[in-house]
Amino acid sequence: MKKIMEKAISPVIKKNKDGKKLTMNFSQAISKILESKKVYKLEWEDKEYYVFMKDDVLLLHKPDKKDYQWVLSRGDLEGIDYIVL
C-alpha cells in the first residue's frame, strides 16, 4: 500500500497591527537572503535558527552557534511562514 505524503505547509501566518501579512513564502524569503538578510521560519524552535548566505552557499545557523549547509525539505520549499530577522 502506498503511503500518501501530506503537504508540509506551516499554517502560521503573522500579521502586523494593520493586518498586513508579515510572513513570506520560500521564493520571497530567498529574495531577502540574496539581499544579505537573515531569514527565520516561524515553525522552527527558536530564533537561534536562521538562514543566510555566505560564499554563495545557503547556511542554517543553529543554537549551537555553528552554521550548517541548509538541506531543504519539501516543507521548507512550500513554507509560507518566513520572516526577516
Image: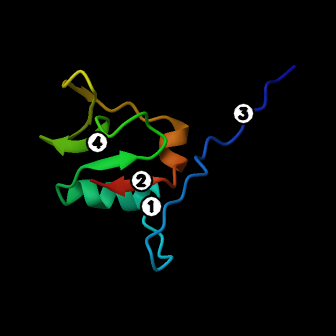
Identify the residue at horizontal 39%, vertical 62% (top origin).
Answer: 28
Mark sitting earlier along the chain (2/1): 1
Label 2 crowd (10 A; few <14 / some 14-19 / many >=20): many
Q: State the image coordinates of residue 55 (x, y, percent, origin top left).
A: 12, 40
Instruction: Report the residue marked by disc 1.
Output: 23
For residue 51, the mark is 4
The local secondary structure at tag 4 comes to strand
Label 3 vs label 2: CA separation? 22 Å
Label 3 crowd (10 A; few <14 / some 14-19 / many >=20): few
The amino acid at mark 1 is Thr
Label 4 crowd (10 A; few <14 / some 14-19 / many >=20): many
For residue 75, the mark is none
Q: In the picture shown, does residue 22 fall above or below 39?
A: below
Label 1 vs label 4: CA separation? 15 Å
Instruction: Report the residue marked by disc 2.
Output: 82
Identify the residue at horizontal 30%, vertical 50% (top origin).
Answer: 39
Label 2 vs label 4: CA separation? 10 Å
Q: CB of mark 2 within 8 Å of CB of mark 1?
A: yes
Q: Nearer the viewer, mark 1 or mark 4?
A: 1
The amino acid at mark 4 is Val
Instruction: Report the residue marked by disc 3.
Output: 5
Judging depth in this view, the residue of 18 and 3 nearest the camera is 18
Q: State the image coordinates of residue 25 (x, y, percent, origin top left).
A: 47, 58
Mark sitting earlier along the chain (2/4): 4
Q: Nearer the viewer, mark 3 or mark 4?
A: 4
The local secondary structure at tag 3 comes to loop
Identify the residue at horizontal 54%, vertical 40% (top origin).
Answer: 75
